[in-house]
């Protein structure tokens, strides 16, 4: 009886000493395929093929177009729609199930990349690009809600940083590969606009990504590495699902303190992609920058995961990651300020090429922005994962995250489309990043515990009528199932 708890053999209906039911994991090929890590890899490849390639095209500045105005307006449409869709996406996910929600979320990306191909062929197709952005925005809200709930529900509490890093690595390979394709295809391109072949390659990969969720395991069949099952919502009525939005905010109001951190999490892309990379560099330089930016995201996610999953207590890890982010924000933005002072929208296009002496310092800054982005996003996800292990509640939280993130992105893309000064947009990045961290600090202090208890969960205890079951009732039902 002195063995560690996770080594005690249990049958599928035997409670552990703490009243938690432990299940035996399958063996052989089934055990490997149904392993949470395998499923998170597959989840990463879905996002590799969809938002990863979207990021690659967006990271070229102007979606790979010489005039970034159409791309900026399309991004306004994407993020405005996603802001609305994301708010309700968690409820849709909990009603339809994560697999179907994930697959529905993939469809819009293929259409949107196709719209840029249409724009290359028909220069007056800008309206189609914006319209496809509306559809992609609705789809992306669904995709990210399903993705976040699975990525944070599959690992144990001690594995969440690692799983986030694995997902972020595979997902950002989409940006890396997409940027590599764009770099190879456009290395000697002097026209400033990405060629048709690049967009066609992206569309083919998008189509493959749509098929991947079909082969993923149903979340209810996933057994974590510690023998516990993923808690799946009961798919109650739409009324109960909408009530769960209110219940999440009522029972866990500390999530509101993360909203400023969510708001700025895509805000900085506009300045980085359009007003820095898109404005300063040749197409060859933009393509190489985008490749290095998304590659650095992989390093950043791995680096922060080592801190988030280290041997320190969870509260100490939360404060340490907060400190690292604050240091990175000031280091990158003090550096960038000296570059931003040197040009405005009225400055003739510098067209800095990779062989230019001014390129080296500026590309290293762009790499550091990639590191900061992945660290910021990973920490935001980790903080949500520190608040809950319930897939249903996490879907709601990630829906809030993507909704507020998209609202911020829509606003700043619109500011760029109406030609707000570069310096104004840059300073807004800096101010909002610092504000996001300081708003999150009380939540880290008051809400992050060293362990999440079942008493802290709410949505998993909702029955089909919307009644909140007690912990004892839930455990009795689980033992009897």
Image (tube, grey):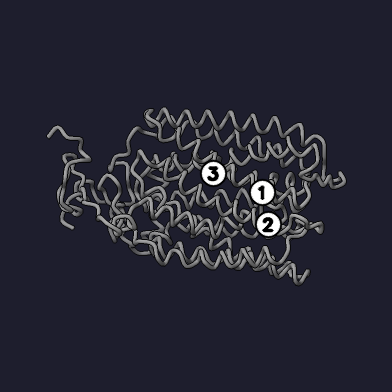
Q: Which numbered disc, 2 or 1, marks the residue that appears first in the sequence?
A: 2
| Residue 389 x %, y % | 35, 46
Q: Quadrant of the C terminus?
A: bottom left
Q: Which numbered marker is on residue 182?
A: 2
Viewed as shown, does residue 50 lie left or right of 217?
right
Q: Which residue is mark 3?
A: 298
For numbered disc 3, what is the local secondary structure?
A: helix
Q: Which residue is mark 1?
A: 290
For numbered disc 1, what is the local secondary structure?
A: helix
- Binning the other alpha carbons within 10 Å of mark 2 as few (below 14), some (14 to 19) or many (20 upward) gives many
| Residue 325 x %, y % | 55, 32
Q: Is residue 371 above or below residue 129?
A: above
- Binning the other alpha carbons within 10 Å of mark 1 as few (below 14), some (14 to 19) or many (20 upward) gives many
Q: Quadrant of the N terminus?
A: top left
Q: Are marks 3 and 1 in contact (CB under 8 Å)?
A: no
Viewed as shown, does residue 343 lie left or right of 95?
right
Viewed as shown, does residue 480 lie left or right of 155?
left
| Residue 295 x %, y % | 59, 45
- Binning the other alpha carbons within 10 Å of mark 3 as few (below 14), some (14 to 19) or many (20 upward) gives many
Q: Are marks 2 and 1 in contact (CB under 8 Å)?
A: yes
Q: Residue at x 68, y 36 (%)?
A: 365
- Gap in Å between the C-alphas at discs 2 and 1? 9 Å
Observer-side mark, 2 or 1, equals: 2
Q: Is residue 60 above or below residue 430?
A: below
For numbered disc 2, what is the local secondary structure?
A: helix
When asked about the image quadrant of residue 342, the answer is: top right
Q: Which residue occupies the foreground of this view, 353 or 119?
A: 353
When asked about the image quadrant of residue 190, the answer is: bottom right
Q: Which numbered disc, 2 or 3, marks the residue that appears first in the sequence?
A: 2
Q: Is residue 155 above or below residue 96?
A: above
């Amino acid at each position: 009886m002195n063995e560690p708890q996770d080594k005690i053999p249990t049958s599928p209906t035997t409670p552990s000493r703490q009243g938690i039911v432990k299940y035996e994991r399958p063996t052989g090929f089934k055990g490997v395929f149904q392993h949470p890590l395998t499923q998170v890899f597959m989840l990463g490849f879905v996002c590799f093929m969809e938002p990863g390639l979207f990021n690659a095209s967006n990271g070229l500045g102007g979606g790979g177009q010489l005039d970034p105005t159409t791309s900026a307006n399309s991004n306004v449409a994407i993020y405005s729609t996603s802001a609305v869709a994301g708010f309700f996406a968690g409820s849709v996910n909990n009603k339809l199930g994560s697999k179907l929600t994930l697959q529905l979320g993939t469809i819009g990306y293929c259409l949107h990349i196709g719209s840029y191909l249409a724009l290359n062929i028909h220069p007056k197709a800008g309206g189609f690009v914006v319209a496809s952005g509306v559809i992609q925005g609705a789809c992306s809200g669904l995709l990210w809600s399903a993705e976040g709930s699975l990525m944070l529900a599959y690992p144990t509490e001690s594995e969440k940083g690692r799983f986030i890093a694995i997902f972020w690595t595979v997902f950002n390979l989409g940006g890396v590969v997409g940027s590599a394709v764009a770099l190879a295809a456009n290395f000697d391109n002097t026209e400033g606009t990405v060629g048709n072949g690049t967009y066609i390659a992206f569309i083919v990969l998008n189509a493959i990504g749509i098929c991947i969720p079909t082969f993923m395991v149903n979340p209810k069949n996933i057994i974590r590495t510690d023998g516990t099952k993923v808690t799946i919502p009961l798919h109650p009525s739409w009324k109960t699902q909408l009530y769960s939005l209110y219940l999440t905010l009522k029972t866990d109001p500390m999530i509101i303190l993360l909203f400023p951190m969510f708001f700025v999490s895509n805000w900085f892309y506009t300045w980085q992609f359009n007003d820095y990379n898109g404005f300063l560099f040749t197409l060859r330089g933009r393509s190489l920058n985008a490749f290095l930016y998304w590659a650095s995201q992989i390093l950043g996610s791995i680096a922060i995961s080592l801190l988030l999953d280290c041997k320190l207590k969870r509260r100490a890890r939360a404060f340490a990651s907060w400190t690292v982010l604050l240091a990175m924000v000031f280091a990158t933005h003090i550096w960038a300020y000296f570059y931003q002072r040197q040009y405005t929208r009225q400055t003739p296009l510098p067209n800095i090429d990779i062989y230019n002496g001014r390129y080296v310092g500026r590309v290293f800054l762009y790499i550091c922005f990639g590191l900061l982005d992945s660290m910021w996003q990973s920490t935001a996800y980790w903080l949500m994962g520190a608040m809950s292990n319930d897939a249903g509640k996490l879907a709601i939280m990630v829906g809030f995250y993507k909704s507020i993130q998209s609202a911020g992105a829509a606003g700043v893309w619109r500011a760029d489309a109406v030609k707000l000064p570069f310096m104004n947009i840059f300073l807004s990045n800096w101010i909002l990043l610092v504000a996001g961290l300081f708003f999150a600090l009380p939540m880290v202090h008051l809400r992050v515990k060293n362990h999440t208890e079942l008493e802290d969960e709410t949505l998993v205890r909702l029955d089909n009528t919307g009644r909140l079951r007690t912990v004892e009732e839930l455990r009795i039902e689980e033992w009897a199932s």
